[in-house]
Structures are given as structure tokens and as C-alpha cells.
Image (tube, coloured by chain):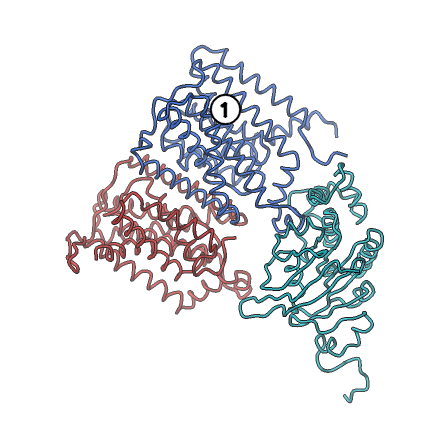
């Protein structure tokens, strides 16, 4: 039962990260290695706004998401878009950006772990398991966020535009869909979602400058397993990975969890490079 | 005379689509055979299957009696069957000469002076003066010639040409036909080509295999094929616009 | 006429001269500070050259080069400290271990398109780093393996040894890059399907070039281990891979000799910025961004080209 609940929480966080990552890839063919930085900045921003600016948590959270979303848009416009012709160029520059951010965080905050305050401090007892309220809230928030995103894409005109661009960018352009502006919008959503994950998970996951690295490795693993560009695939794979890791953590040891992600990546790449639900293969 | 290339019951599905249906064909040494068919008939799929670029579901392909269906694409080239692509993709970043050199590295090439041989090949296709140019800057017609030179560099016995005239102007087509005929007679190459430009095709090939929807609908000399009702129907539809006796 | 460019006499001569100058340089100063810096620079040169041979020529950028460096270094550490084997055995052992990893990782990852290959290798390096920490009982965890015996006690002599290794590797890989190997790798970069149609077994070539790249990276790792006399999981860090890639970009991708210059330049530069030690990563990243935008052909190789063309009338 513990595994069920904790697995769900982990999966929810991974889902928020993976969906954003696969969204910007599906729409703009960008593998954004700075995605982990959005996660990190979300957590740090919440920390700064509550601890140093003394803002109430809910306000700090909203502001953090907004700030990171804007940051994401700026990164895309200034650094990534000029290099869009080369996927490797985008990869390198997003990675370089991620390290600039990591270094900046290190220089400003040092390497000690920081405390992001939780929305809910109390523990709940669910089906006989003690769970921190914050974790449950994270699960709830993730569900609402991803659900709304899915609804947005399926049922609104803007959402259809996004789908159109991801399926056929040239045709979408001919139809007058302003792809550049949509890219910015999608980037904002992607970054905002990652920041949300950082804000919600910050209280119970480690917050230090290099926290952006593992999320990227895992987001990549999830997206490979679920299929690049497929949101339902990413969600499904996020749950698979989240549960696999939780099970491994309980049965073997916590330190083995990262092996799960890279092993699953490599295995999937060998046997089924398009992922479980993907339409485009990675080669 | 045993066949150079034998295709037996070659079959391929793409998902639910039956793209090639129990295809049978024979090619004898020294022939120029053309595969005729409208778009979507399965011509390029056939080429891809024969040359190992996509796997077939079942059937046999025999080159000089040796089964090659399960072999890798580059191995098949090493056995003497080379192909060109309809969408020529030169090696970006390499010169024209280097493009041909890459084709010269296979097991069938016995010469030691690869550079000299590559220049000769370029001269044959008329690109000798462009040897040091960047290959990605070539015109469409020149790219076609480069494709052929690159395929020739592998010292093939059988050459598969995938729509060599596509996108070319009439003078270029004429020049390319002359080249193909010259290669056939001087180098004793067996040639299998796909086209749907009827005119040049008919003058070039000695035998035509017409296909539609993955099946052979007719086989014979160019003169016979043009009159075959099934071929006309596949291309133009049930009405024969050339039949001036129609009441219309 | 010659099919392949082959080694250029002028460049080889220039390289030899540069090598000699580098060898003599520390003797002009007292103390071992400069020798130390140059030794590290030379080792980075080995890493950069090995990266350039595979990734620079094929265009398949390997973001996990640090993995091969790390396993080579740890192989040296294990052999030397845990098994008490003489230090010279580290050199072939590190190469073998790295080559093994290259084969195992290469098969599933090399068929992927550029960015996915890069990320798969990056993930592998990150995981190796975690593995070193997880199995801390065997690997020494954060602190790694200590008290490795040096190969050559005298720092200056060791420097000359490393320099000789660097020179040999650069010579070998330059020659290969300008022979049919280089042609094939560049063709793979151009278009893989056309390569197959030209009869080339591209999977074999890709894997072999990765194996060669890994072998020398591992060798460099062992040399580093016997210089620092310790190995730690930091070797696997993404930072190391990024640094090397930056060095190659500065030097000129695909030129083989350029990255050597890039390695020297950047190592010396960072030493000069020693006081800003914590800023190093930031500076490298910013430099990389700058080069990607403004100088995609690098600095070193274009300068050398210009110098050569000065001597020519046409």
C-alpha cells in the first residue's frame, strides 16, 4: 500500500516534468536540456520569495511559476531559436544554459540544501499509511494541472493549433497559424509545469544547485519509453517509471533507483526505439 | 541462360496495406528492363526490398542463384547489385570526387589507384570538371549523374535506377538516356529501372514489367505494353482518350 | 592521383615543432607549477582529440565522453590500489575496459539520430557517476580511490611522457582522419542511407570509431589517475564532457589537431582564472554559447589555415 501511494506521488512529479519536455519536443522538435533548470528555478524561486521576501506561500508559488515561464520563453527566443536548424546545436546550448543556471545558483546560494516550505505540514493517514500532506497535495495538483493541459489541448482552438503544428509544421504555417508565438506559449507552459513540479516537490525532495540533472535524465528516459511527442505516452511512462523506481527503492535500496531510468532507456532504445506509444522513432 | 536476378513470390505488407503481392520476376544478364506503374503501385518498395533497405515478409530473391533477401543492404552491394535513389542525397561536406571515392571502397573494386578510377568514372558521366566542387552545390541533373557514378564505383553487375529522369528537363533526359545506353553497351551492365515517364522509358528498355497495386498486370515489349488495355486502364482510367472513335 | 589527402608535411612539421616547444617550455621556469598545468592540458588534449575523431568526423556528438575517461581512470585505480598491480599495466587495462564499455553502449545507441545518441550517452555517464557512489564500498564513494602510485616520479619526465603519448595519438588519428577512415566517417555524417547504397557497413564503422575514441579517452583517464594519484566520481561529471566539447569547438571540429590547441588554450586560461575557480563552469558554458553563435568553426584551426595560406601566392 505504501508503494501504491508513494509510487503515485513520484509518478505525478515525473509526469509533470515529462509532459512539458515532450510537449516542447512535439511542437518545436526541441530537446531542451535546460528543462531541469526550470524545475530547479521553480524550487529556488519559491524558497527566495517565501524566505527572503516573506511572501505567503501561495503567492510565492504563483509568482515562481510565472517567473520561470517567462525565463523559459526568453531562453527559447534568445538562445534556442537562432540555432533551431541544428538539433545538436539546440542540445548543446540548452545544456550550456542549464550549467550557467546551476553555477549561478551555486554562486548565489552555495551548495547546501535549501528548505522550500510546504503547503501542508501535517501528515495524513491514508489506508493505514502515513503520508505527508504535501505529497498528497502534489499528487492532486499534478492531476489537475495535467488534466487541464490535456483538456486545453483537446478542446480549445489554441490547443488545436498546437496539435496542428506538432503534426505538420509547414502545413500549419500555410494555414496562418503563428508558429513562433505558439512556440513561446508552449515553452511557457512547459517551463511553468516544470516550475510547478519544483515548487510542489521542493519541500520533500532535495533542493541544491545540481538538482536539474537527474530530472533531465529521467524526463528523457520517460519520453523515450513513452514515445517522443506523445503526451498520453509520457504520462503512462511516467507512471511506469515512478512505480518501477518506488518498487526498487522498497525492495532493494533507494540508491538503485537511478539505474532503473537509464536501464529502461537503453533497453527501450534497443528493442523499440519508437517507444511504447510513439509515432516517431528516435532514428 | 540462367537468370541473373530471380524474384520469387516476394510479398510485403505495410500494416494493413498489401503493398507487394507474391511478386515474380526474372532478369537476364545484359537486359535493360523497365518497371512501369502509376504512383503507389509498389515500384520503389520493390527496389527497397530487392536491395535490402526494407525487409520483405516472405519470398525469395536470388542473385546469380544466391539467396539475398535476408542480407544487409551494404552486403548486397558487395555482391554486385547497386542502386540509385530517386531523391539524390549526396554526401554533404564531401567533394564530388570524394562522393565517388566512397563508393569505391567495397570488395569488388580491384584497382589500386582509386583516385584515378574515380576520375575516370566522373569523366564517364560528364562530371570530371566538377570533381573538386562541393557536392551539395550541384544542380539536379548533375546530382543524378553523381548518383550513377557513385553506384558505378561499386563495380556492379546489376544496376537499379530509381526514377532517374524525375525532375529533369527534356535535354537532360536525352543526355541521361544516352549515358544509360552507353553504360549498358560498353560496360555490359544489366539494368533495371523504374520510371513513369513513358517516352524515354520505351526507347531505352527491351522489356517492360507493368505493375499496379503491387501486382504485375502485364509484361512484354514496349510496343505491346502501350497497347495493353490493363496498362492503359491503370494509367488513364477506363476511357481510352486515344480512341477517336468514341462517341463524345 | 592520390585518392586520400594523407598527412600534410607542413602540418606535421608544425605539429612537431609545437610539441618540442611545449616540451621545452617548463624547463625555462623553476618549480613544478607550470609542468603540472601543462600535464593536465596535455591530458585534456588527449581527451579532446579522441572525442574529435569520432564525434567531430561523424557529427554524432557524444555527450558522455566522461564515461570512458572515468572507467579508464577507475580501472587504473582498481588495478593499482586494490590489486596491487604495477602502474604500467594500467595503460593497456584502461584502454581495454573503455573499449568494452564502448562496444556495450555503442550497439544500442549508435543507431539513434544525433541528439538522441548524445542524450543516451549523457544519461549513461550520469548513471555511471551514481553507480560509483552507490557501490561506495568497492569504489570508495565520494572520495574514490586514493594513493595511486605514479608512473614516473619526476614531474617533468612524466610530462614529457604524456606529451609523447599526445603527439602519437594526434599523429595516428590525424592520419586516419585523412585516409579512407576519415572519408567513410565523413560520409556517414553526410547521409547514412547513401553509405549503405555505396556498400559500406556503417554500423561497424560507427562502433569501431567509438571504440577507438573510447580507448584513447580511457588511456587519458589512466594517465590522469597516475598524475593526480587519486580518482573520484567527479571524473564522470557532465562538466568534464562539456569542457572537452568546448575545447573541440574552440579548436575546430573534425580537424583533430585543432582540439589540441583548444585544450591547451582553455586549460591555461582556466588556470589563469584560478581565483575564480567556482566560475569555471559558468565561463565554459558561456564560452560554448558564444562559440556556437559566432564562431562555429572554432578559433585554432581557422587561424592555422590562415597562416598557411599566407605563404601561398594564389
Whether B67 is drawn above or below A205: the answer is below
| Residue in the picture at 47% in, 56% down | A272
Q: Which residue is mark 1?
A: C42
Q: Position of residue B106 (x, y in %)?
A: 69, 44
Q: Chain B: give its colour.
A: cyan
Q: Determine whether the residue tagged by mark 1 lies in a helix, strand or loop.
A: helix
Q: Place residue A234 in its image quadrant.
A: bottom left
Q: What color was chain C assigned in the picture?
A: blue
What is the x, y in percent for residue B40?
64, 69
Q: Say which chain is red.
A: A
Looking at the image, residue C80 lies above or below residue A76: above
Instruction: Specify the quadrant of the image occupied by residue A189.
Output: bottom left
Vertical side of B99 occupied by B162: above or below:
below
Q: Is residue A193 visible?
A: no
Quadrant position of the N terminus of chain C in the picture: top right
Relative to A186, C204 lies left or right: right
Answer with left or right where residue A238 lies relative to residue B168: left
Identify which residue, C9 or C208, lies in the foreground. Answer: C208
Q: Quadrant of the C terminus of chain C?
A: top right
Amino acid at each position: 500500500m505504501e508503494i501504491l501511494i508513494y509510487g503515485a506521488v513520484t509518478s505525478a512529479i515525473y509526469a509533470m516534468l515529462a509532459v512539458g519536455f515532450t510537449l516542447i519536443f512535439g511542437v518545436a522538435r526541441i530537446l531542451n536540456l535546460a528543462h531541469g533548470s526550470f524545475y530547479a528555478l521553480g524550487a529556488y524561486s519559491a524558497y527566495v520569495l517565501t524566505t527572503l521576501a516573506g511572501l505567503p506561500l501561495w503567492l510565492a508559488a504563483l509568482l515562481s511559476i510565472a517567473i520561470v515561464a517567462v525565463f523559459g520563453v526568453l531562453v527559447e527566443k534568445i538562445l534556442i531559436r537562432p540555432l533551431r536548424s541544428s538539433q545538436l546545436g539546440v542540445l548543446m546550448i540548452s545544456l550550456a544554459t542549464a550549467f550557467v543556471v546551476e553555477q549561478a545558483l551555486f554562486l548565489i546560494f552555495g551548495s547546501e540544501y535549501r528548505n522550500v516550505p510546504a503547503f501542508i505540514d501535517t501528515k495524513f493517514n491514508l489506508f493505514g499509511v502515513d503520508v505527508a500532506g504535501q505529497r498528497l497535495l502534489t499528487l492532486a495538483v499534478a492531476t489537475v494541472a495535467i488534466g487541464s493541459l490535456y483538456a486545453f489541448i483537446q478542446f480549445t482552438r489554441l490547443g488545436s493549433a498546437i496539435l496542428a503544428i506538432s503534426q505538420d509544421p509547414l502545413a500549419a504555417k500555410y494555414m496562418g497559424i503563428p508558429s513562433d508565438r505558439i512556440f513561446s506559449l508552449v515553452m511557457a507552459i512547459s517551463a511553468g509545469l516544470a516550475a510547478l513540479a519544483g515548487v510542489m516537490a521542493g519541500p520533500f525532495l532535495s533542493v541544491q544547485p545540481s538538482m536539474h540533472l537527474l530530472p533531465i535524465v529521467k524526463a528523457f528516459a520517460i519520453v523515450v519509453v513513452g514515445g517522443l511527442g506523445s503526451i498520453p505516452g509520457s504520462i503512462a511512462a511516467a507512471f511506469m517509471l515512478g512505480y518501477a523506481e518506488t518498487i526498487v527503492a522498497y525492495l532493494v535500496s533507494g540508491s538503485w533507483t537511478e539505474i532503473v531510468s537509464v536501464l529502461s532507456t537503453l533497453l527501450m532504445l534497443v528493442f523499440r526505439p519508437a517507444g511504447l506509444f510513439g509515432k516517431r522513432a528516435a532514428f | 541462360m540462367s537468370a541473373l536476378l530471380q524474384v520469387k513470390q516476394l510479398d510485403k505488407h505495410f500494416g494493413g496495406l498489401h503493398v507487394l503481392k507474391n511478386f515474380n520476376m526474372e532478369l537476364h544478364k545484359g537486359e535493360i528492363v523497365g518497371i512501369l506503374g502509376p504512383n503507389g503501385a509498389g515500384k520503389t518498395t520493390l527496389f527497397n526490398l530487392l536491395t535490402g533497405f526494407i525487409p520483405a515478409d516472405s519470398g525469395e530473391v536470388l542473385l546469380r542463384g544466391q539467396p539475398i533477401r535476408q542480407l544487409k543492404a551494404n552486403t548486397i552491394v558487395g555482391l554486385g547489385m547497386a542502386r540509385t535513389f530517386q531523391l539524390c542525397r549526396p554526401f554533404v561536406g564531401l567533394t564530388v570526387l570524394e562522393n565517388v571515392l566512397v563508393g569505391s571502397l567495397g570488395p569488388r573494386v580491384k584497382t589500386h589507384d582509386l583516385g584515378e578510377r574515380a576520375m575516370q568514372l566522373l569523366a564517364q558521366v560528364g562530371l570530371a570538371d566538377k570533381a573538386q566542387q562541393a557536392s551539395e552545390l550541384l544542380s539536379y541533373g548533375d546530382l543524378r549523374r553523381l548518383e550513377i557514378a557513385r553506384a558505378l564505383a561499386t563495380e556492379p553487375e546489376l544496376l537499379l535506377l530509381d526514377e532517374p529522369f524525375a525532375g529533369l528537363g527534356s535535354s537532360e533526359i536525352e543526355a541521361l538516356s544516352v549515358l544509360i545506353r552507353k553504360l549498358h553497351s560498353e560496360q555490359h551492365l544489366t539494368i533495371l529501372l523504374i520510371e513513369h515517364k513513358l517516352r524515354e522509358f520505351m526507347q531505352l528498355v527491351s522489356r517492360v514489367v507493368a505493375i499496379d497495386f503491387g501486382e504485375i498486370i502485364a509484361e512484354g515489349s514496349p510496343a505491346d505494353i502501350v497497347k495493353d488495355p490493363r496498362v492503359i486502364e491503370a494509367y488513364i482510367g477506363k476511357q481510352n482518350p486515344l480512341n477517336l472513335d468514341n462517341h463524345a | 592521383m592520390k585518392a586520400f589527402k594523407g598527412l600534410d608535411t607542413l602540418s606535421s612539421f608544425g605539429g612537431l615543432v609545437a610539441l618540442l616547444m611545449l616540451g621545452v617550455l617548463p624547463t625555462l621556469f623553476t618549480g613544478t607549477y607550470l609542468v603540472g598545468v601543462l600535464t593536465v592540458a596535455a591530458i585534456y588534449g588527449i581527451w579532446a582529440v579522441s572525442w574529435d575523431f569520432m564525434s567531430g568526423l561523424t557529427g554524432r556528438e557524444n555527450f558522455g565522453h566522461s564515461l570512458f575517461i572515468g572507467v579508464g581512470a577507475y580501472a587504473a585505480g582498481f588495478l593499482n590500489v586494490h590489486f596491487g598491480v604495477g602502474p604500467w599495466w594500467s595503460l593497456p587495462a584502461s584502454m581495454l575496459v573503455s573499449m568494452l564499455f564502448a562496444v556495450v553502449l555503442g550497439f544500442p545507441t549508435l543507431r539513434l539520430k544525433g541528439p538522441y545518441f548524445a542524450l543516451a550517452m549523457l544519461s549513461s555517464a550520469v548513471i555511471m557517476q551514481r553507480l560509483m557512489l552507490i557501490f561506495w564500498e568497492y569504489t570508495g564513494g565520494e572520495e574514490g580511490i586514493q594513493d595511486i602510485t605514479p608512473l614516473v616520479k619526476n614531474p617533468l619526465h612524466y610530462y614529457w611522457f604524456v606529451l609523447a603519448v599526445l603527439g602519437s595519438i594526434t599523429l595516428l588519428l590525424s592520419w586516419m582522419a585523412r585516409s579512407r577512415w576519415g572519408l567513410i566517417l565523413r560520409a556517414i555524417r553526410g547521409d547514412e542511407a547513401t553509405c549503405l547504397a555505396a556498400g559500406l557497413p556503417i554500423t561497424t564503422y560507427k562502433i569501431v570509431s567509438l571504440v577507438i575514441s573510447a580507448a584513447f579517452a580511457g588511456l587519458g583517464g589512466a594517465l590522469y589517475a597516475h598524475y593526480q594519484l587519486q580518482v573520484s566520481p567527479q571524473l564522470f561529471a557532465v562538466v568534464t564532457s562539456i569542457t572537452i566539447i568546448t575545447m573541440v569547438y574552440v579548436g575546430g571540429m573534425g580537424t583533430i589537431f585543432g582540439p589540441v590547441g583548444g585544450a591547451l588554450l582553455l586549460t591555461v586560461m582556466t588556470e589563469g582564472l584560478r581565483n575564480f575557480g567556482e566560475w569555471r563552469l559558468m565561463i565554459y558554458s558561456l564560452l560554448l554559447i558564444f562559440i556556437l553563435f559566432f564562431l562555429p568553426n572554432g578559433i585554432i584551426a581557422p587561424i592555422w589555415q590562415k597562416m598557411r595560406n599566407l605563404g601561398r601566392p594564389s
